[in-house]
Image (cartoon, rainbow, N blue to C red):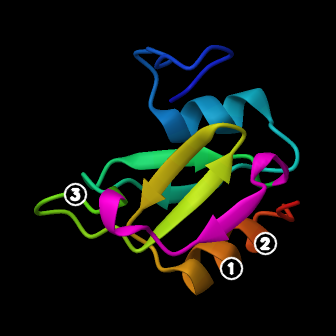
């Protein structure tokens, strides 16, 4: 999980339990990184969802969409349509 800084937020608590305990509203959208680990995203922080560029493909990993969150480009396994749907279902609308 990314915290206030760009580094990982390390916790012994499962990410889903942490998100539920914090009562984040609107809820965070859960997508899948190319290495199959979850990534939790606040949809309102997403400025764009797009297809990956050739340079964003990763060997042995299926990158089907890229979320643009500030200067962070988060690759995910979900395609653009699915990623958009997941973010919208969580009550978030990308900018």
Calculate the distance from the C-alpha at mark 3 to the C-alpha at mark 1. 24 Å
Q: Is residue 27 left or right of residue 29?
A: right
Q: Which mark is residue 1?
A: none
**Which residue shows up at 68% across the image and 79% down it?**
85
Q: Is residue 42 above or below residue 78?
A: above
Q: What SS does tag 2 mark?
A: helix
Q: Which mark is residue 58?
A: 3
The picture quadrant where one finds residue 94 is bottom right
Q: Is residue 69 above or below residue 43?
A: above
**Which residue shows up at 60% across the image and 29% down it?**
18
Please identify, in this view, whether the residue under mark 3 or under mark 1 is nearer the observer. Answer: 3
Q: Is residue 43 above or below residue 45?
A: below
Q: Earlier in the sequence, mark 3 or mark 1?
A: 3
Calculate the distance from the C-alpha at mark 3 to the C-alpha at mark 2. 26 Å
Q: What SS does tag 1 mark?
A: helix
Q: Earlier in the sequence, mark 3 or mark 2?
A: 3
Q: Which mark is residue 88?
A: 2
Q: Is residue 87 left or right of residue 58?
A: right
C-beta proximity under 8 Å, tags 3 and 1? no
Q: What SS does tag 3 mark?
A: loop
| Magenta-span inclusion, residue 84 | no
Q: Is residue 63 above or below residue 29?
A: below
Dot 2 crowding, Cα within 10 Å, few <14, some 14–19, many 20+: some
Calculate the distance from the C-alpha at mark 2 to the C-alpha at mark 1. 5 Å
Which segment is the magenta one? 44-55
The picture quadrant where one finds residue 53 is bottom left
Quarter of the image for the C terminus: give it. Answer: bottom right
**Residue marked by disc 1:** 85
Dot 1 crowding, Cα within 10 Å, few <14, some 14–19, many 20+: some
C-beta proximity under 8 Å, tags 2 and 1? yes
């Amino acid at each position: 999980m990314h915290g206030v800084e760009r580094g990982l937020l390390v916790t012994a608590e499962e990410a889903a339990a942490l998100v539920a305990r914090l009562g984040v509203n609107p809820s965070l959208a859960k997508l899948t990184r190319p290495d199959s680990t979850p990534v939790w995203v606040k949809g309102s922080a997403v400025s764009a969802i797009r297809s990956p560029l050739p340079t964003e493909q990763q060997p042995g990993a299926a990158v089907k969409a890229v979320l643009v969150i500030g200067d962070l480009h988060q690759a995910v396994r979900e395609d653009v349509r699915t990623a958009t749907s997941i973010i919208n279902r969580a009550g978030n609308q990308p900018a």
